[in-house]
Image (tube, rainbow, N blue to C red):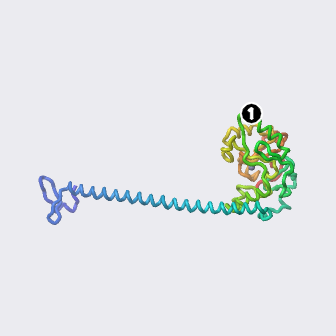
Amino acid sequence: MLPTKCTKNTSVSQGVKTCCILAICIHPDAIQWFTASINAVTDERKAESAAELARLDAEIQEIVERKAEEERLRKLEEAKQTAEEVIRNPSQAAQTIDASSCNVSGKRTDASQPSVLVNKKHCVQPLSYTPSDLVTVNGATISAKAADDFQALFLAAQAAGQTVSVTSSYRSYSTQTATYNYWVSISGAAGADEYSARPGYSEHQTGFAVDFANSDGSCSLNCFGTTSQYAWLQDNAATYGFIQRYYAGKENVTGYMAEEWHYRYVGPPVALDMKTKDILTLEEYWGLPGGGY
Ligand SMILES: [Zn+2]
């Protein structure tokens, strides 16, 4: 096909119409070949440019990610130093609560009993409470009042081929302070309240809470809910006086997101009664307030 501008200035050679410019007549195949060559070179350059741009994009992305990682590590290091300082000197811990008004109902305040209620409206009293009867059983540091039942649960799970491990149990006020302050330094107070109990508000401080994982600890926290060990606990924990403390759908009642791994010792009578009545939270079972701070 000839360019339209050639229509008036053409000659016929061997039966083929050619395009003539300044007395030079070019065979249409040559024009086609030339155009195709130019197009091919242009496409190649375009592809090269696109590849170069993609490479630059990837390089920029890598730099951005490295900077973000450096910033994250810097914050972690800062938080670690803050936490270490708090552990060395607990009195320096940020006062996040008013100890005199942190138990809204004034009920179930005895932190040494499995009947204690601890949630965002009921702190551990006194705030710096430490159980006097802590023992360590199968990796769990817990109140002696829960020890026999915990041991029985552990052995029954093992016998059923559903061996569990413990990732966290008793935590002191100062450990909780350090944990909480760590999250404050990472996410601010509002963010910290989503992930961590404020010091004095954690069931772990009573020695009645245990965080479970699968046998080798490789599946903990959010992963644990998917395990056969979790299913076994759902069926059997109540027999030994333990309940899953934070269920999905009960966030407004407990004040916490679902935690399939966190179990609380309340004693077999209460745990079994809750199971029979299909009541999932201590707040509802005891008719006491929960939810946010
Ligand atoms: Zn826990």
- The furthest residue to the front: 88
Q: Residue furthest left?
A: 14
Q: Secondary structure at mark 1?
A: helix
| Vertical relation: 92 (above or below) 13 | below
At 45% from the left and 61% from the top, the residue drawn is: 56
Instruction: Give whichever of 52, 272 is nearer the camera.
Output: 52
For disc 1, the marked residue is 159
Residue 51: percent from left, percent from top = 41, 57
At a point 55% along the width and 60% down the height, the residue shown is 66
Q: Residue at x 70, y 61 (%)?
A: 184
Where is residue 136? Give x, y as percent.
80, 45
- Amino acid found under the numbered disc labelled 1: Ala
Residue 183, how many percent across, how many down?
A: 70, 59
Please state which of residues 282 and 160 is positioned toward the viewer in this rendering. 160
> Where residue 52 sits: x, y (%)?
41, 59
Which image quadrant is residue 180 in?
bottom right
Answer left or right for 224 relative to 70.
right
